Each structure stands twice: as structure tokens, then as C-alpha cells.
Image: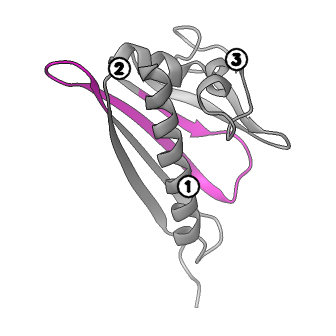
Amino acid sequence: MVERQRTFAFEITTSSSADAPELFAMVVDGRRWSEWARPVVAESYMEQEGDPAPGGVGAIRVIGRKPLLVREETVEYEQDRRHVYVLRSSSPVRDYRGEVTLIPRDGGGTDLVWRCSFVERIPGTGPAFRAGLRSFIQDLSRRLVRAAER
């Protein structure tokens, strides 16, 4: 029997008193990740700027902690509203896609929704990878909000 590789997804939602443009600027500019996501992301830079610069469509950011650095490419970009990226590094999963959506709240502040999806490369590994990635993205979301509110 051949096991089918399955698709996994999750969504993290958090709120911030910071405005959407501030949160967006911090997410799309790969150079800033090591400012707000330390110690998890100790190194971050732009390998290639996108349109619009720095983090628009076609941008490639490199983030992580040596020796584990990942390359992510921006594939959709709506200024101050939505940032979609895909993984361009080798990975234990296929077709990884992340999407950060920022929703301004009446009266100030922003709701941040971070969605991720991927296809398991090795059948049966998806649930564990999703759990680990979900925890990682939850941590990143908290760090982003804390830094933006400073």
C-alpha cells in the first residue's frame, strides 16, 4: 500500500496595540528579523530585494541561526495588509507557504493572522512537524507584537 503525502495547515491569531504599517514593515524586511525575533532568529538579511523594496514580490530573506538558515521568497504583497512567502530552502516538508495578514481594529491596534501550510515529504511526519512549526510561529508572533509595541 502506498501512503499519500498529506497537506497540513494551521493559523495563529494575536492582537497588538501597534498599527498595521509598523508590524508589516517588521515582517517584510528580512534585515529586521534578528532585531525582533532573537534569540530564535540570530541572523537575518535580504539576499535579494523585491518590488517594492525591500520586501515586495521577488524578495528573498535569509533568517535563522547558523548552521540552520532558511531562504524565504515573497510571492504576494499587499502594502501594510498581507505578506505571503514560500520556502526556498531544502526542508523536511514540501510546498511550505506562509501568509501574514494584518487587520486594523476600530479604535486602534491590529489583529495579526499568521497562516502556514505544507505537504509532508515523508508520510506520517506531518503531525509532528505541524506541532513544532505551530509552536515556532506562535513564538515569533509574540516576539513581533512585543517588539512593535515598544
Q: Residues within 10 Å of mark 2 (few under 14, many from 20)?
A: some
Q: Residue furthest front?
A: 150
Q: Quick one: 6 or 17, which is closer to the camera?
A: 17
Instruction: Tell me whether the residue at label 2 lies in contact with that at label 3, contact meaning CB atoms closer than 8 angstroms.
Output: no
- Front: mark 2 or 3: 2
Vertical arrangement, residue 59 with respect to residue 2, above or below? above
The label on residue 48 is 3
Q: Residue at x 70, y 53 (%)?
A: 91
Q: Is residue 134 left or right of residue 105?
A: right
Q: Quick one: 44 or 96, which is closer to the camera?
A: 44
Q: Is residue 46 left or right of residue 147?
A: right
Q: Amino acid at mark 3?
A: Gln
Whether residue 48 is in magenta: the answer is no
Q: Residue at x 38, y 47 (%)?
A: 12
Magenta span: chief secondary structure: strand
Q: Quick one: 40 or 102, which is closer to the camera?
A: 40
Q: CA distance from mark 2 to mark 3?
A: 28 Å
Q: Which residues are magenta?
A: 83-111
- Front: mark 1 or 2: 2
Vertical arrangement, residue 37 with respect to residue 7, above or below? above
Dot 1 or dot 2, earlier in sequence: 2
Tag 2 secondary structure: loop
Q: Residue at x 64, y 13 (%)?
A: 49
- Front: mark 3 or 1: 1
> Percent position (x, y) of residue 87?
62, 41
Residue 80 appearing in the image? no
Q: Give the residue pinned by disc 1.
A: 133
Q: Amino acid at mark 2?
A: Ala
> Percent position (x, y) of residue 16?
33, 29
Instruction: Tell me whether the residue at label 1 lies in contact with that at label 2, contact meaning CB atoms closer than 8 angstroms.
Output: no
Q: Give the residue pinned by disc 2.
A: 18
